[in-house]
Amino acid sequence: MKERLKERFPAWCEDFTKEQHTTCLTDDLDSLLGCSIEKMVKGNPINHFYSFDQLYTADKSDKRKAIGVDLALNEGKSWCNHVVRIHEDDYVNPDTANINAVLNVHKGNYFQKYAMSTALMMWSYYQLPLPESEEGKKLLLSIDSSFLGHYDNRFKGVHNAYLRELGFEELINCLDRTSKKEFFDIQQKYNTKAKIKIDGNGYLYTKLPLAELQGIFNVPLELPQQQFQKTHEFESKEGSTYTTNSKNNLPHLVSFALTGTKKFKYTTVN
């Protein structure tokens, strides 16, 4: 990641004190790979699982603050790739490590957003080496469909500009020699859109091929084996920018993400 971008991230990202935090996992591969990167680089283990309606915790006695991964928290530390403003003057969590937050992306300039995965952003920030194999590079670009912007002439310039800011010109070359269909095939081959869920006994499970993915990424990739217990409940909602022109008008926010110029999703706590 180029220094001019990296220096705009929250100061906590540069604190490499080992095992200072835990992480909060959400329901997909992007979050799991990001949590795995945090564990590998800083020793921060998964202790929470956020399903958007509930929060589950494995070890309630662990009082370390959690970092949300691929989670647009309104308060607290998080890695995130979402657009977190409706209006350009909306409040933004100062502890969110998010390109779209630090570059002031909002409804008015939505199509200038960073539209790739949280894991790819973290990969760049922590200066991890890209997968050696062509398959690995394609797979990394398949997470959260990070490849899509390259194949739309309206967004290709913005997409490539962000890859250059991340220091990933090599991935632009990979995109240039790969068809969009090949990426869809990769997603299907590795079931990259499979969800992470919690069963009735509090254990996490998924149909993601974790052992195979771990070998390709060279990042330890596994779900916690501990039993989780529900600790909080939230209300998930959707809204329209036609009727809400600022997220500051939404009380009791837990998380918020603009999902287009017209819609947003958010969670609240009573």
Image (cartoon, helix red, strand yellow):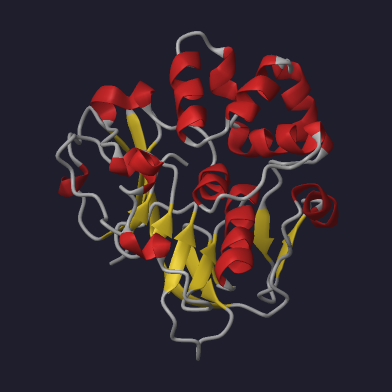
Residue 248 appears anywhere in the view: yes
Compare residues 163 and 75 and report the one nearer the observer: 163
The picture places residue 106, in percent across and down from the top left corner, at: 27, 32
Compare residues 227 and 181 and report the one nearer the observer: 181
The picture places residue 213, in percent across and down from the top left corner, at: 79, 50
Compare residues 249 and 164 and report the one nearer the observer: 164
User: With 49 as the anchor, is 233 left or right in this view?
Assistant: left
Q: Residue at x 65, y 49 (%)?
A: 29
The picture places residue 235, in percent across and down from the top left corner, at: 38, 58
Q: Residue at x 47, y 76 (%)?
A: 17
User: With 231 as the anchor, is 221 left or right in this view?
Assistant: right
Examine the image and state in which quarter residue 268 appears. Answer: bottom left
Residue 261 appears anywhere in the view: no
- Whether 22 is drawn above or below 186: the answer is below
- Whether 80 is drawn above or below 89: the answer is below
Q: Residue at x 80, y 40 (%)?
A: 190
- Whether 69 is drawn above or below 264: the answer is below
Of the 4 image quadrants, the one containing the C terminus is bottom left
